[in-house]
Image (cartoon, grey):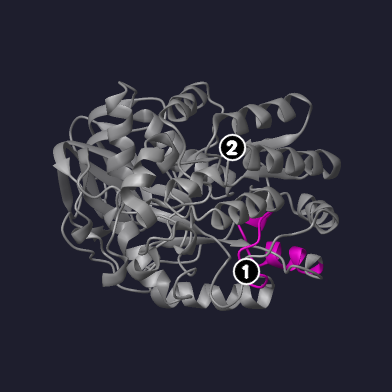
Amino acid sequence: MQEAYDRVLRGDLVLPDAVLPDAYVAVRGETIAAIGQGTLPPAKQVDDFSGKLILPGLVDGHMHTGSAIGWPGIEGATATAAAGGVTTVCDMPYDVPRAVTSAEIFREKVEAVHQWAHVDVALYGTIRKTGGVDAIAGLAEAGASAFKLSTYEYDAVRFPRIDHPTMVEAFREIAKTGLMVAVHNEDQELVERLTAEARASGRVDPIMHARTRPPLAETMADLEIFEIGMETGAHVHIAHSSVARGFDIAESFRSMGGRATGEACIQYLCMTEEDLVRLKGFGKCNPPLRTAEEVERMWVALTAGKIAYVSTDHAPWQREKKLGDDIFACGAGLTGMQSYAPLMYTLLAERGLPVTWMARLCAENTARYHGLFPKKGAIRIGSDADFAVLETGDFVFDEATIQDRPDARWSPYHGRAMKARVAATFLRGAAIWNGTEVQAKPGQGRFVPRQHRESVLG
């Protein structure tokens, strides 16, 4: 007689290449033990989601839990992740008051994850503005999923610009680890000059954020980082391209033997300069929102397979930091974690594209790039039993439902019509969101180290 599974979920399973209607996935312990269709196997608990979609738990490759209030921000940011069907987040290293620039700081952050996280967390590492290259090997050994550097400086300690000689040296060391190095791609000199000119002319209205950070600021930085990647052998990744040309540039470097890739944040697939004008500070992010025509070009790049994965760049700034008439004084970054799954489903549905793309671009590919696959990002036997359950229909996103601290309950997608909502989320076989409340406790999430040093690019 077959031993009963701990849990069986029934519904339409969404895989990267197919949807299995009226199927099931069985869980034993924390992992997936069986997948099938037809009669359900014996189980201690059955969760019947007939008519709903069961996707692999989403893996967000780009978020900032600690940029606003430091590591305690992990608690709220991962709670809203659970509500958004996200079971693994890859957290950026630019935390308050200091960045994750050594194995010692990295291990301290791991402990913070184990204290506060509601979902599983992978961690980026970075380097100091000067003298930090020697820490790269230790960060990789500590389990970093990737590295992050910047061509633009927001803060000399927390978010520094790395100069070209140091970047060459750092890329060489990162290449030895096999890990990807993601880069914030904006040209400092161009942005600073344009911003100074705008301020001098008295233009501090919202559209000037886009005008002072033009596409050229991105593509100039893209060329720099990919050339350094060619020289050093590092896998260089655009952390967020708001323009399709960034992915074309990456493709051209791959054709020359380079290890060059890039990701799209979801806002660049649906929001435009008009949204920046409408939302003011609440629509400010870096790089900025672009034209409607650029959004269409982004979809051409996505359809052509040029985009590695789709992320959120979730940055839950306090509401007060997004207010004011001077757009340059507002904090840069959008919330997007809880809206991630409903919005991505909606964008695909609106364009008549298959939901399987969501399993690939928002789960499997992200896990592959961060060395977490097949533990994360997949519905397959032996993988962690992480699931996002979507109920399709007509819904409206309400920022009041955001599962974070009160001053982070704002969203650029407030009031947007959605074609799905997250009905349930499961982390390693445990229910952590039931459609209305987070069931996970702080500390239920775990740090997920990179599982191997193999590159997704071979």
Residue type for callout 1: Asp
Q: Is residue 367 visible?
A: yes
Horizontal side, residue 30 vs residue 113: left or right: left
Residue 37 vs 335, above or below: the answer is above
- In 3D space, how far apart are the residues under numbered discs 2 and 1 (Cα atoms)? 23 Å
* Residue 373 at x, y percent in the picture: 53, 45
Residue 33 seen anywhere in this rendered image of the structure: no
Q: Quadrant of the N terminus?
A: top left
Residue 427: x and y in percent read 34, 57
Left or right: residue 458 versus residue 421 is right
Which residue corresponds to the image point at 64% horizontal and 48% vertical from the top-left?
A: 186
Task: Classify the position of the C terminus by image quarter.
Answer: top right
* Amino acid under disc 2: Pro
Side of 17 relative to 419 (left or right)? right
Q: Which residue is mark 1?
A: 155
Secondary structure beneath disc 2? helix
Residue identified by numbered label 2: 215
Q: Is residue 186 above or below residue 380?
A: below
Q: Which region shows up in magenta?
A: 134-158
Circles 2 and 1, Cβ within 8 Å, touching? The answer is no
Q: Quadrant of residue 421?
A: top left
Question: Is residue 125 rendered magenta in the image?
Answer: no
